[in-house]
Image (cartoon, rainbow, N blue to C red):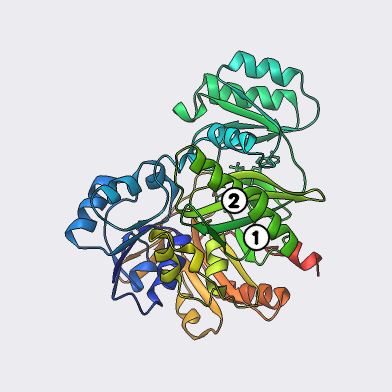
């Protein structure tokens, strides 16, 4: 089988790495890929949101299966376009991807189908939103309706902060049309976890639980990022919570969409807040998580391509997954300055050391190969990932491996996995 992976991050390196292990795969392509992916797949220089060129490439090169990593092409309709061209593709249609591309759509679906989520109001004008904020007490959250590269959510501790967020989104239009509507919701304060399922629109198979670390600095301080590290499983999700997530959140969402005439296939990611009263839905993403995928896939013993095909072929009910019991931890090494401005093009030292390490995996994100050297090419650069006999062993292995890597301005968190450690 000829398989194409779309994207260029650490998630896509992990996807490509796992897909490559399947005996079903003869040839693996990735568009556009990165320095690490180029070592295991043929990289094609097409951007992940250039849907027309990707479709033409997949038709011309007779792809048997395409796996889409990021949200932009999904919400841009890549699955619809591929299907219209007779191509097999894993992911939701443009309409189904609205679960991620419109927070208003997601919240209204949750309300209609009784999915537990923070109480909210929707505003289409800034005056109404500001007036509402003036009547609030305590913390609350302002969210731009559309995609805003992970920057569209502001947790506000004061009315002034909330009003500033509304003015930036709705009056100064910093996220363009994504801020035409805003959701203002109750602030939930508990521990977060990510549950990702693979679905064919009828049934859903959960992957192992995970937790990511969104803030840039230790102790969950500083601005939000795409994710600075992750671990799986998340001890905050015992079996009873997993059952509740499937029964009260995932199933009603998939069934609710079906009742609205929308079939959801692909990966569905639920971002959850878990307190004593059970799981509450913070957000849906229409794809695999990044960096969650980097800690989930090393634990998956089953053939990942069979799982992907079961989603594409409407056969998820027959899929069953086997997991490595050992925990997995991943630490992101980022460019100095990220998530603000940063420089790229610095040579990365120490990559060779990883070839000899057991149960340690190096997933590349923002890297590229130039003149035989690997250099930094993005904000998040590498994901150093390790399986361990327990969470402490996985964390230790990970940080020992991190010590081998060096590039100018390198930053990483030193406390990845601390919540899981504290729960032991
Ligand atoms: P989202 O883009 O909706 O995932 O939100 C990004 C992050 O904002 C989440 O992972 C949470 O850390 C935080 N967040 C979102 N909604 C809420 C909420 N209602 N209460 C507290 N934190 C929230
Ligand atoms: N790790 C958060 C995300 O993938 O959106």
- N-term-proximal mark, 2 vs 1: 2
Q: Is residue 348 above or below residue 217?
A: below
Q: Is residue 388 above or below residue 157?
A: below
For residue 408, side relative to residue 283 (left or right): left
Mark 2 is surrounded, within 10 Å at the Cα level, by few (under 14), some (14 to 19) or many (20 or more) other residues, namely some
- Looking at the rendering, in which quadrant would you find the N terminus? bottom left
- Measure how far apart labels 2 and 1 are at the Cα level: 35 Å
Q: Nearer the viewer, residue 64 or 299?
A: 64
Q: Nearer the viewer, residue 246 or 163?
A: 246
Quadrant in which residue 195 is drawn: bottom right
- Looking at the rendering, in which quadrant would you find the C terminus? bottom right
Quadrant in which residue 283 is drawn: top right
* Residue to which mark 2 is pinned: 251
| Beta carbon of the mark 1 residue lies under 8 A of ligand 2 | no
Discs 2/1, front: 2
Q: Nearer the viewer, residue 383 or 67?
A: 67
Mark 1 is surrounded, within 10 Å at the Cα level, by few (under 14), some (14 to 19) or many (20 or more) other residues, namely some
Q: Nearer the viewer, residue 379 or 72?
A: 72
For residue 44, side relative to residue 377 (left or right): left
Residue at 70% across / 64% down in the picture? 417
Q: Is residue 305 above or below residue 95?
A: below
Residue 380: x percent and y percent?
50, 56
Residue 308: x percent and y percent?
42, 64
Regarding ligand 1, which quadrant of the image does it lie in?
top right
Q: Secondary structure at mark 1?
A: loop
Q: Secondary structure at mark 2?
A: helix
Q: Is residue 232 visible?
A: yes
Residue at 65% across / 43% down in the picture? 282
For residue 387, side relative to residue 274 (left or right): left
């Amino acid at each position: 089988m000829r398989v194409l992976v779309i994207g260029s991050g650490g998630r896509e390196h992990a996807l490509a790495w796992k897909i490559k292990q399947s005996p079903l795969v003869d040839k693996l392509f990735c568009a556009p890929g990165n320095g690490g992916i180029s070592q295991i797949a043929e990289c094609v220089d097409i951007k992940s949101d250039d849907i027309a060129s990707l479709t033409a490439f997949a038709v011309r090169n007779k792809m048997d299966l395409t796996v889409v990593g990021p949200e932009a092409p999904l919400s841009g309709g890549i699955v619809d376009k591929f299907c219209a061209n007779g191509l097999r593709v894993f992911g939701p249609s443009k309409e189904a991807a609205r679960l991620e591309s419109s927070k208003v759509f997601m919240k209204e679906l949750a309300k209609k189908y009784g999915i537990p989520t923070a109480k909210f109001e929707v505003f289409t004008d800034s005056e109404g939103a500001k007036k509402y904020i003036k009547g609030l007490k305590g913390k609350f959250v302002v969210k731009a309706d559309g995609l805003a590269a992970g920057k569209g959510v502001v947790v506000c501790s004061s009315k002034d902060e909330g009003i500033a967020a509304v003015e930036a989104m709705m009056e100064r239009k910093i996220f363009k049309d994504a801020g035409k509507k805003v959701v203002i919701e109750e602030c939930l304060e508990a521990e977060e976890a990510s549950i990702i399922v693979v679905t064919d629109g009828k049934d859903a198979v959960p992957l192992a639980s995970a937790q990511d670390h969104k803030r840039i600095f230790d102790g969950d301080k500083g601005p939000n990022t795409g994710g600075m590290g992750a671990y799986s499983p998340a001890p905050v999700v015992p079996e009873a919570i997993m059952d509740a997530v499937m029964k009260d959140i995932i199933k009603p969402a998939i069934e609710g969409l079906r009742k609205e005439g929308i079939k959801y296939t692909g990966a569905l990611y639920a971002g959850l807040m878990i307190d004593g009263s059970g799981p509450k839905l913070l957000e849906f993403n229409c794809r695999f998580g990044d960096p969650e995928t980097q800690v989930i896939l090393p634990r998956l013993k089953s053939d990942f391509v069979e799982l992907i095909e079961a989603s594409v072929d409407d056969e998820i009910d027959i899929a069953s997954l086997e997991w490595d019991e050992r925990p997995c931890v991943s630490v992101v090494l980022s460019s100095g300055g990220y998530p603000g401005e940063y420089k790229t093009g610095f040579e990365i030292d120490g990559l060779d050391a990883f070839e000899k390490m057991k149960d340690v995996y190096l997933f590349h994100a923002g890297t590229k190969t130039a003149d035989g050297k690997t250099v930094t090419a993005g904000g998040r650069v590498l994901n150093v990932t390790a399986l361990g006999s327990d969470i402490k062993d996985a964390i230790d292995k990970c940080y020992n491996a991190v010590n081998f890597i060096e590039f100018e301005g390198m930053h990483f968190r030193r406390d990845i996995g601390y919540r899981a450690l504290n729960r032991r």
